Image (spheres, helix red, strand yellow):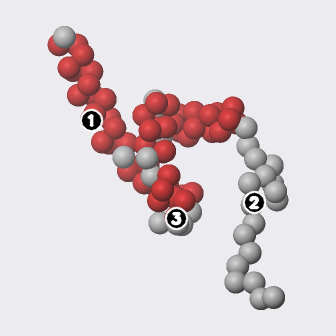
Amino acid sequence: MKYKAIIFDLFGTPVDSYSVQGYNKLLTDMASALELSVEDFSRFWRDPTYERGVGIFKTTEESIRYTKGQKKQMKELRDEFKKKTLKS
């Protein structure tokens, strides 16, 4: 019998899966390096999950550049929110 495809489940097979705590620490460290709050960075990091998953971003570095490019937009949104909050 000829096979047309073979599917491998690689989650945890060749290397151990990371823990939730380890992943959250990674997000915290990356946010700190970009001088962003963890909440802002996490939102902008998770938004392009699809792009990373299907290969639009070929490397982790491309994802980081995309997220870092959002930094100015995030700062403007945060500053606008602060102004509105202080006026209330």
- Give the amino acid at mark 1: Glu
Q: Residue furthest top?
A: 88
Q: Which residue is mark 3?
A: 54
Give the CA distance from mark 1 to mark 2. 40 Å
In the figure, residue 25 lies in which quadrant? Answer: top right
Give the CA distance from mark 1 to mark 3. 30 Å
Q: Which residue is mark 2?
A: 10
- Neighbourhood count class around disc 2 (C-alpha, 10 Å): few under 14, some 14–19, many 20 upward: few
- Neighbourhood count class around disc 3 (C-alpha, 10 Å): few under 14, some 14–19, many 20 upward: few
- Give the amino acid at mark 3: Val
Residue at (23% x, 28% y) in the render: 80
Q: Which residue is mark 1?
A: 76
Residue at (75% x, 84% y) in the render: 3
Q: Does 46 sit above or below residue 25?
A: below
x, y percent for residue 81: 26, 25
Residue at (19% x, 11% y) in the render: 88
x, y percent for residue 14: 82, 59
Q: Nearer the viewer, residue 38 or 56?
A: 56
x, y percent for residue 27: 57, 38
